[in-house]
Amino acid sequence: MWFRNLRPYRLPNRLGIDADTLSTRMADKPFVPCRPTQPYSTGWLPALDDSASDLVHAAGPFWLIRLNREEKLLPASVIRDEVNARVSQIATAQGRKVYRKEKLEITDEVTQDLMPRAFSRSRPIEALIHEREGWLWVNQASAPRAEDLLNALREVIGTLPAELPRTRKSPAQVMTDWLLHGGVPEGFELGEDADLEDPREGGGVVRARGVALDSDDIRAHLEGGMVVSRLALDWQERLSFVLDKDLVIRRLKFADELVQTHEDLAEDRLAQRDADFLLMGENIAALQSELVRHFGGLEV
């Protein structure tokens, strides 16, 4: 339930549908496990929990959705070894060379033959939608995984012009100024991790881990022209995270006090997850608003 990453997207236009309508459309594309020869399968899962029924869970102004992608794990080395074995058998039995076109056909045959015996791996991908304010957060730091969810959402909505937010001030430059000129805004505290990069072509990267970010060594790198590309922060003793220069949040952790807020509902799993989801959404939305404000607002 508690997201560990936030890949934020702006929704320039309202979606034009409510949560119930979106859930109804998603019902046409539910998750179905891979068939024996199918390399992957993608579809929607009940949002709140496997024991729930709604494909879109709404709490307050927030919607939760969950996509599952199941993939067959068939290592290239296994395919290559089997292809080589079959090519060798043909060459020996028929006394001829096997050329590229035939090798490709053999590779297709091997893949189809091995696929039913391959292991499967499932990767649920969650997203939080604040449709009223035009935000969508995917619980993924990986752009390709986030795009899997966005593409699936486009299929059921028809169009989804989601894009990473752009702020008037460069997050990299603002974070650099925080370290150079004595501190972060009120409500934030520095963590102990940062990545510094040289913006010049071929420039290097310095990864600081478990150090004081206001130290002379860090300042020397910044005064030498490096800029902050990632910065560990704590917000109001509620959330700790690493902020990327593209506003992606990694290693997100909610304070124990927040996570334990609804322990009294533990006997009703769905009720607890519903309350936790609303609390999580409120905090994510508030944090996003604060970050955008300190980076000069969104570009229009």
Image (cartoon, rainbow, N blue to C red):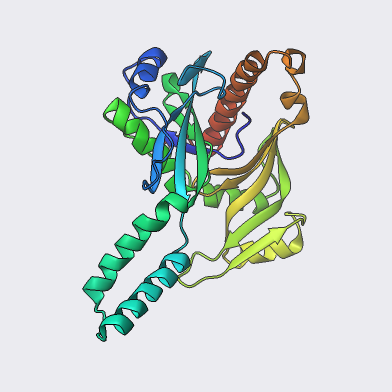
Q: Is residue 256 left or right of residue 105?
A: right
Q: Could you say which is closer to the camera, residue 254 or residue 267?
A: 267
Q: In which quarter of the image is the C terminus?
A: top left
Q: Please tell me whether residue 108 is drawn above or below residue 43 in the rendered image.
A: below
Q: Identify the residue shown where x is 36% and y is 73%.
A: 86
The residue most toward the bottom is 95
Q: Is residue 222 above or below residue 34?
A: below
72 horizontally vs 186: left or right: left
Residue at the spot x=30%, y=81% of the render? 93
Where residue 198 sits in the image (x, y, percent)? Answer: 54, 66
Kindly indicate the quadrant of the structure image that contains residue 103. Answer: bottom left
Q: Which of 100 and 294 is in front in this view?
A: 100
The picture places residue 122, in percent across and down from the top left corner, at 51, 41
Q: In this view, does 99 lie above or below 17?
A: below
Residue occupying the point 64% across, 16% down: 275
Task: Name, please, the residue furthest toward the left.
Answer: 101
Q: Can residue 160 be seen in this view?
A: no
- Left or right of 231 in this view: 112: left
- Quarter of the rendering containing residue 265: top right
215 and 145: which is toward the camera: 145
Residue 162 position in % (x across, y down): 36, 35
Choose between 273 and 81: the one closer to the eye: 81
Q: In which quarter of the image is the N terminus?
A: top right
Taking the spot 51% from the left edge, 41% from the top edge, the residue there is 123
Could you tell me residue 114's position as x and y percent?
41, 57
Residue 86 visible at all: yes
How many dots with numbers? 0
